[in-house]
Image (cartoon, coloured by chain):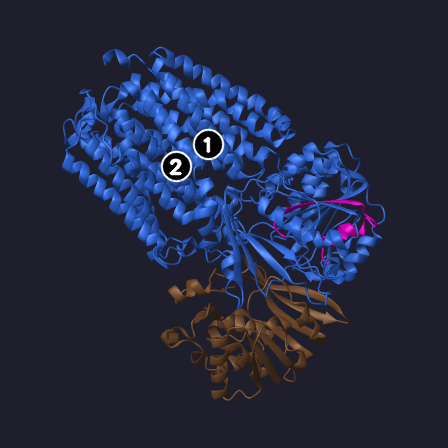
Amino acid sequence: MVSLQIRLRGVSDKKVLNAMSQVPRHRFVPKELLSQAYADHPLPIGQGQTISQPYIVALMTEKLKLIGNERILEIGTGSGYQAAILAKVAKEVYTIEIKEKLYKKAESLLRSLGFSKIKTRHGDGYFGWPEAAPFDCIMITASIDHIPPPLLKQLKDGGRLILPLGNPFSYQHLSLVTKYDDEYTVKQITGVLFVPMTGHALDQNPRVTNDIP
Amino acid sequence: MILAAVFLLSLSSLALEVLLTRVFSISQWNHLSFMVISIALFGFAAAGTFLNIIDTQKKDWEKRLSSSGPVKIFIILYTVTAIGSFMVLNRIPLDYFRLPLEPVQIFYLLTAYLLLTLPFFFAGLVISLAYAFIPEKSGFVYFASMAGSACGAIIPFPFLPFLGEGRSIILAALIPLIIVPFEKPTTNKKHALTKNISRGKRFAFQVTCLFIVLMTGLLVSVEDGLEPKVKPSPYKDLSRFLQFPDTRIFETVTGLRGRFDSVHSPYTRFAPGLSLKFKDILPEQWVIYKDGDTPFFIYKQQLQKDEWFSKFTLPYAGYMLVPNPEHILLIQDGGGSGIPCAMASGACNITVVEQKPKIAHIVRNHYNIPVVNQNPRAFMAQSDKHYDIIHIENWGGSLPGSDALTQGYLFTTASFSEYLNHLTENGILIMARKLLLPPADSIRLWAGAYESLRSLEFENPERHIAVLRNWSTFTLIVSVRPFNDMTGLKDFARDMNFDLVYIPGITKEMVNRFNIFDAPYHFFEISRLAEAYRSGTEEAYFETYPLDVAPQSDSRPFPGRFLKWNRLKALYKITGSRFYSLFMSGEIVVCVVFLEALVIAVFLLMIPVFTIKKQDKKPNISLLLYFLAVGAGFMFLELFFIKKYIFIFGDPVISFTVVLTGILVFSGFGGCCSQRIGPGGLRYVLIALIAVLIFIFLGLDPMIHRILELSKILQYTLATLLLILPSFLVGLPFPLGMRFLLNRPAHRAYAWTANGCASVLTSIISAQIAISLGIPIIILCAAAAYLVALLMSNTKTIGQK
């Protein structure tokens, strides 16, 4: 997976590549999809959510340019896989999930895998985690059509926020927001195209995939 | 009895068609309503083909089938299949977007298609039997069919608000049953259909009808029973939004103009074009969805500071240029963020023009501001008031491409001129839209503004236009006075971290600073276009650009359409070489439906040619062409007027209802009067019809513009009066052809098939003609079709009869 799907596509940060090698992705996918755990596409995890394609996980992590001492906020825990990868390359990870079932499942899994640097919360990620702010980096792992103001407020000066910006049924831009002295730049990294999918669609066909760059 | 059956089945099947169109508008998208039209007409056409096949197998089939008993059975089958197919359809896991990914979806699609065809097949069977069996009364059959259809076009609307789509469909399907229990005694022994059926059979029919009505009532009334509830597509904004916790629909209103769902959610956060400099929480909001899409947001502005956020939005750049505006005109088509902008500007008088009555009512009550519930173009045509700011807000549908076929008159060059003519001497026009990449809409609107300014004889039009963007939206600003000092706009953009795309004197260094693309694509293209206008080479620019971005006229008003068919391959590559991304485009869906319809039409028309052995019984090619041409001409005329009248009424549903009812009623009278016309009259009728159609092509536009300036009542009256002559004339060729050109019942059934097939193909192709060549070309196509009919109308065959 790492060499063929990730390194070949240009992800070169060794810390990220190591993390992708170390975290057992198969633990984060539903049992019935185990055989596809390392395939080059995302997988449904229930509740209308997905575990992202391995390459996208690596790319989003690399774009944050982590050196190891960062405190990171992740919005959208989902399966917990992205939080696990971040925990391997950063100091602390705070992750919020809006869907209670997913939150409980991810929390229990991350605890059982020994990810003590990850703090989980059930709630609306839109408002961030004010008690733990400010953060060096914020990652939103669900497509969103605007950048939540409360999250920008919780970003440190020089901080970076990465997210797939745009209509979930259109082309989205994986975008990197950088904050300098209360000025913001939004850089479009790459276009991503999401197969339209909802909870309803997922429940009916667990094989359909999304977020292919 | 058969005339009554024709009337009721026509009524019911057209009501079913209208209601299914509503269902598809909610459960899928508007462009899929083409599927409903094709399903209905194919059902009719298949009936004609079926009778041709029967003709090869059975003697005197027309007498047997058109007798009272079989007709009643067909009516019962119609009702059962209409209700049954709709209930099954609502439960099939058909997902149109998964078609390219899952082969099983093709099966679901075909099943849905076939099931929905069945009721129309049975309705078509009765109507074609009537034509085949009583040719001497073709005019009356035609009248019964058209009058029934006209009633069917309007009958769903009073019921929709009370019954909703599902129950209205069931009611419409039950209507024809009312004649089944009765038997009219008659002494006329000429026709088999007048034979009385036995008492036992009559009782059986009565029991069957009662059983169907009781069963349907039971199924509908049971809590969580089989009552079909129409759900919006899971890909529509509403369905996605309802997945958030504590999100609920608190009111649903169904009616003529669509289904409006009011939704409350703690997660409603709408502020398009919001600067990243805004750090506060957005005011509480709720939202109204039309047909599960096109949201309109209402802000709960309890405090003065609740409007504060709008000063951080991109469209507010236009408000910055008019420090103390007195009069603001807001034209809203979805969105809703323009109202807080206007309020935050401190304007004394704000007027909102909102076309949807439901939303107009809510906005008026919620914000306590004057709201004009009118077509914006009609409002502009009737008003001589001038405004400091005119703000147009329209963000399009949630799915790009889905509104490629949507007709809209807010962004045509003529609309720009109307806006500019209603601005004060320091006035500003603001247009806010989604930002597309590759650049498309921004180029078209810039060009539209430029051409409008040029036509109004402004010097250096480019000095009156500015464009700004953030990462997802852009705002076009047009000023009546030329932009001389750009400092204010530049400062606003810098302070809010917005990017300049175009201002007079812009340079490359000033763009792509905060919302960074790999290259400043929008700046490059608009600068190139400005240069093209300066050098007079704009036509070459539009020709070579990969998307259709030329400014649009009132004759070709499709603001969401950018596809160039000769650049499809390039578009496929740009969108990631994935089939489904093209599949999202309404225009491509229509093309796929057309190809599918063409295959089925050829199949239905070819079956009789191959199954009929004897040469003399085979359908005649010139007569086939005649009925194809007559079917095509009728549909071209109908669609031309539907599309034209959207300009007057603003709403496609109103236009559809007025035109369909008018054309069907007046053509029904035409059919009735055809009984008095002899065989020699057919050619004169066709010549007169072609002349009228050419006159409409040349003279309708100025009349429509005059009508727009009149009151609503006069608009409806004159629009209906204009339909009388062409509709009356198009009602003649089909029944006359049936009477004088054909001498075998099987041929009449075949003519019915040809008419149905031509109608399907024409209804689909008209959409493509309108978006590619313009709406007026459709009426020329109608004239051309009747010219073909004229050339093929050799009434000497009557002598052979």
Based on the displayed image, in which of its 4 quarters is residue A138 positioned? bottom right
Viewer-closest of B710 and A86: B710
Which chain is displayed in blue in the rendered image? B
User: Circle 1 sits in a helix, a strand or a loop, which is it?
Assistant: helix
Disc number at residue B660?
Answer: 1
Q: Which residues are magenta?
A: B313-335
Give the class, few, some or many, for how many residues have Cα within 10 Å of label 2's Cα (few <14, many ≥20): many
- On screen, residue B354 versus residue B773, left or right, reads right
The type of residue carrying mark 2 is Leu
Res. B48 mark: none
A29 relative to B250, above or below: below
Q: Which residue lies under the disc numbered 2?
A: B14
Instruction: Indicate the position of residue B236 as horizontal and vertical percent values.
Output: 50, 56
Q: Which residue type carries mark 1?
A: Leu
- In the rendered view, does B193 fall on the left or right side of B696? left
Q: Colour of chain A?
A: brown
Q: Is residue B238 magenta?
A: no
Query: Eyeballing the image, is B625 above or below B98?
Result: above
Q: CA distance from mark 1 to mark 2?
A: 10 Å
Residue B440: in sight, yes or no?
no
